[in-house]
Every structure is written in C-alpha cells, then in structure tokens.
Image: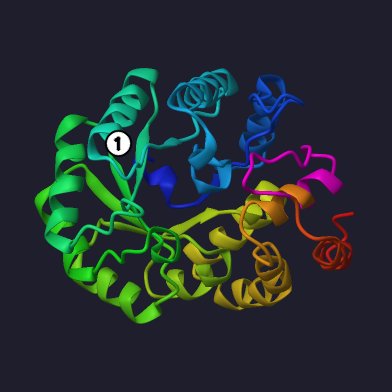
Amino acid sequence: MTKIDKLKNVITAMITPFNEDFSIDEEKYREFIKFQIENGCQLLTMGTTGESATLSHEEHHQAMNIAVDEAKKSGKDPFVLAGAGSNSTKEAISLAQYAEKAGADGLLIVVPYYNKPVQHSLIDHFSLIADSVSLPIILYNVPSRTGRNLEPETVSTLAHSKDNIIGIKCASGNIDQITKIIKTTPDDFIVLSGDDSMTYHIMALGGKGVISVASNIIPSKMVEFTKSMLNNEWRIARDMQLELYDLFKVLFIETNPGPVKYAADVMDLMNIRMRMPLTPPLEENQKKIKIVLKGLDLI
C-alpha cells in the first residue's frame, strides 16, 4: 500500500482541544491523536472541524507540528492531511509550504471563502498553490460555507492539469454533481465524502472514503463502515448506514463542530470549549444529542 492509498479510508477531521485560556491543549491533542491512530483512522489537522477559522497561523503551525510528531511516534505511519486553505492565495501558499516543511503527507485546500472567485479564478488559485509545493492536494468543496461552488468542469480541469491535485472532499450535498466529478476525472482521482451521511451514496458511485466528523467519537466504527464498502459488502454497509444515520444527522443539529465537541465532552474524550463566535449547543439540542448517543450505547 502506498501512502496515498491510506486516504482510501476514514480521515478524521479532528476537533481541537483548548485550555481554560483557549490556547491549544497540546497534551490533550496528542492524546486524542493517539486515540484516532489506534482506532485505524488517518488524520486531518486544522480542518473546519478543528476550528481553523478562529486559529492564528502560528496555531495552525503548532497543530501541524503536533500531528506530524505523534504520527511519527505511533509506528503505524498514518496519513497526516493538513488544512491549508485561505481566502487569500498568498496565505494559502504560506500555510501549504509550512505544512510541507513540517512533514505533513498532504494538503486539504478549501475553496476561497467570502470573496467568491469565479471558476477560472479558482483554477488559477489552486494551480498556484499546487505549483508552490510537491505535496499531494485534496480540493475541498463546501459551498454552504464558502459561498462558491467548485463546478465539476473546474475539478476535472485541475485533476487533468496538475499531477499533485489528486482528489476532492465533496461536501456540496449534490449527488448529481458528485457523479459528474467521478465520471470526468481520472480513474485514480480520489473522491472522498465530506458529509458522513452521504458516504454510503458517494462510495456506491466509486468514492473511496470519508473525511469524517463522526469518527472523532466513533473512529473504529467508521473504519468498519468504509471497509465494508471497499470490500463490496454492501448489505453490511447499508445496515450500518441506517444504524448510524441519526448520529450523522444530530452531529449537524447546530453548526459543526459544536455538536461533536459536546458529544466528545459527555463521552470524556475532550472538553466542550470552543473559540467564539462558536458556542456549545443549546440545552434542548444537547438533550437530542444525548438521546442518540445513548441509543448507540456510547454513553
């Protein structure tokens, strides 16, 4: 198995633990990374779920360094994907180059948010980042957060023109669009679900895995889920999809990562602290999360 083949699996979009002063809790982060590795997951540090939008670039660097260090210590050689996106191409290149120097195995680059570049501008943006590093790049399309959709034709252009743009995290919720991406990109282009509840559908079309929120709290279960599909055990996967569906949905009852951080807190995996403007879920939603966790014997 090559290192890139490890992306055909579960990559946990890891939540970030904070101390009382809201600095990164390095000790807890290392402990959490070990928990993910021991349960068979690959690692994404500084994704959306890690609250990257409210962390400084210095804190991004700190988180990348910790993830790479723990991966090396583990002896299991997990893939370390580093979130390095920005609405500024210059800043994205800076983060990408730091991640490469730090020893990350690949980059997750989100569509630039807020400034809404058109498609030909997106091609230029991602191409410049790809040219600035040698690391493999996973594009990240999440139009509900960025305000701009990465069109299938744009994905195909990038996939065919840049050797180190090797895949995409799809969080558009548009299965027709995802089908077009799978159909028009090279056979070895890695399409990953960016939404736990869509993983079954995307992998049925030829997707290879998921960048997961749920695996923060059920890592081994998510690995079992994706492996069943990679092994063409579709009846097992269907049953697991139905079993886990309520969890997948309740983890987005409020803005991510609020619900999964609350779940991690009640499961004694990590405290609930979040960087403002994000705050813990409302009490009524906390009750709903607990009901689902109890139904799965997680608490």
User: Residue 268 placed where, x, y %?
Assistant: 85, 40
For the point 28% across and 25% down, which residue is it?
Answer: 97
User: Residue 14 placed where, x, y %?
Assistant: 59, 41
Whether residue 2 is visible here, answered yes or no, is no
Picture quadrant where residue 76 is located? top right
Q: Taking 253 as reference, is 146 left or right?
A: left
Asked whether 185 or 53 is in front, the reply is 53
Q: Taking 87 as reference, is 299 left or right?
A: right
Q: Amino acid at mark 1?
A: Ala
Which span of residues is magenta-colored? 263-279
Asked whether 96 or 12 is in front, the reply is 96
Instruction: Give the tally of numbered discs.
Output: 1
Picture quadrant where residue 20 is located? top right
Which residue does the numbered mark 1 point to in the structure image? 92
As drawn, 130 above or below 294: above
Q: Please tell me how crowded label 1 is: few (under 14), some (14-19), or many (20+) other residues with Cα within 10 Å.
A: many
For the point 85% across and 55% down, which residue is it?
Answer: 298
For the point 12% across and 59% down, which residue is it?
Answer: 120
- In the rendered image, the residue lying farthest to the bottom is 176
User: Residue 11 placed where, x, y %?
Assistant: 51, 47
Decide whether the magenta segment is chiefly helix, strand or loop. Answer: loop
Which quarter shows the C terminus? bottom right
Whether residue 151 is visible here, answered yes or no, is yes
As drawn, 243 above or below 84: below
Asked whether 44 or 287 is in front, the reply is 287
Q: Is residue 72 magenta?
A: no
For the point 55% across and 58% down, which residue is it?
Answer: 227
